[in-house]
Image (tube, grey):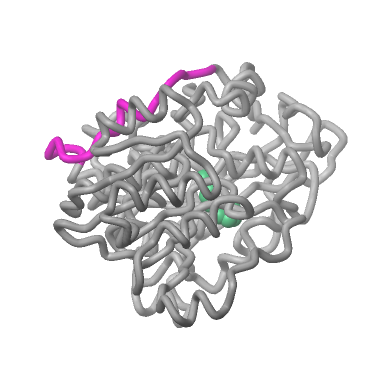
Amino acid sequence: MNTRAALFRTIGAPLSIETIALDPPKPTEVLVRIAAVGLCRTDLHVMRGERRVAMQPMVLGHEAAGVVEATGPAVEGIAPGDHVVLTFIPGCGVCRWCAQGLHHLCAEGPRITQGPQLDGSYRRRDAHGEDVGAFCMIGGFAERTVVDRASVIVIDKDIPLDLAALVACGVPAGVGAARHRANVKAGDSVLVVGCGGDGMNVVQGARLCGATTIIAADIAPYKRELALSFGATHTTDAQGEALTRAVHALTDGVGVNHAFVCIDPATTLLPAFRATQKAGNIVVTAITPDTVKQIDVPPLELFATQKAIMGAVYGFMSPRLQIPALLRLYRAGDLKLRELITRTYALADINQGYADLEAGKNLRGVVVF
Ligand code: CXF
Ligand code: ZN
């Protein structure tokens, strides 16, 4: 069949809206009609050449939810008509990580920027017959996609699919970083640097954990304002050394228990590290451009203060377990999802959506079909 899709062809150029050929699902695969897909900053990093992918053209988009239209003969437990969220790491189910329920650490993870399907072959071709890749083995910026069952989570049908898309990336990344990576405890203090798609969800994750001081740092006034409604107790527009000083002023001069680096680690990691108290945690959820090869942290400072700097992908919990759990929290009224969406777009207007993200206008833009 044919499908409309937004293709990444050239670094620095807008996505190209084209009709491409999409093959039917192989035995372990699933055909999904995309209902909604979020405009995450990761795809923007790819478009700008800051996060290199292995091939072009490639259909970007990795924060997607939709409806199953067909399944391959080996697929069990997923049926046409099912509502699904797609996971940006496949979760092969058999590697040493998946065997422990740690699908966010799946051995196939490093291949998600390569382009082909999980089995190594391609399902998409452009008008010239050239293979088209799928970012994160999803390629969600399209009306339809074919993905391996390893990327599919069936969800309850009462969840609106535009909200379901959000629990494919930004929400688990942020909420999970607070709950599962830093293990924020009731009464803890937290700093969130960058209150976008990840950071705003760290704020609400910290609130869910019972943190009593939640400092939201962002240069955009409307994100600081919104952070207060997501659970932040304080906001600041300070950056660099001024941010460290502002946080110390709010925490008896010792710093927070946990700092979250949710934007541009190259410039925010060290100020966040220094805004964290002794033996505290610094969690990095944001992507650093490939051009930045290292970030300096004075080793004696690290040793003497006994802090832990850690990474968190997918909020450090299996998306397979976390996504249904997050949707239960939403249904119980404990997790904000609708409030994350700033604007929606048609697929044809996706470049406007990314322009709005770049201009700092969007917390989350979502393409709805
Ligand atoms: C990213 C993580 C790094 C590889 C591509 C997907 N996740 C979400 O934005
Ligand atoms: Zn993302």
**Direction from residue 215 to residue 347 in the image, left or right:** right
**Res 197 quadrant in image:** top left
Above or below 117: residue 309: below
Picture coordinates of residue 7 (x, y %)?
72, 34
Picture coordinates of residue 350 (x, y %)?
62, 23
Is 337 one of the magenta-colored residues? yes
Between 339 and 239, the residue placed more toward the observer is 239
Is 180 one of the magenta-colored residues? no
- Residue drawn at x 21%, y 39% is 330
- Residue drawn at x 30%, y 27% is 338
Whether residue 288 can be seen here: yes
Above or below 231: residue 212: below
Picture coordinates of residue 323 (x, y %)?
31, 51
- Residue drawn at x 55%, y 59% is 270
Residue found at the far left of this picture: 332
**Which residues, given as a range, are shown in magenta?**
330-345
Whether residue 69 can be seen here: no
Between 85 and 263, the residue placed more toward the observer is 263
**Res 277 quadrant in image:** bottom left
Picture coordinates of residue 253 (x, y %)?
32, 57
Above or below 349: residue 153: below
Above or below 194: residue 103: below
**Direction from residue 268 to residue 74 in the image, left or right:** left
Task: Report the quarter where the N terminus lies.
Answer: top right
Residue found at the far right of this picture: 128
Between 152 and 46, the residue placed more toward the observer is 46
**Direction from residue 107 to residue 180 in the image, left or right:** left
User: What count of labels does the image hold?
Assistant: 0
- Residue drawn at x 87%, y 35% is 128
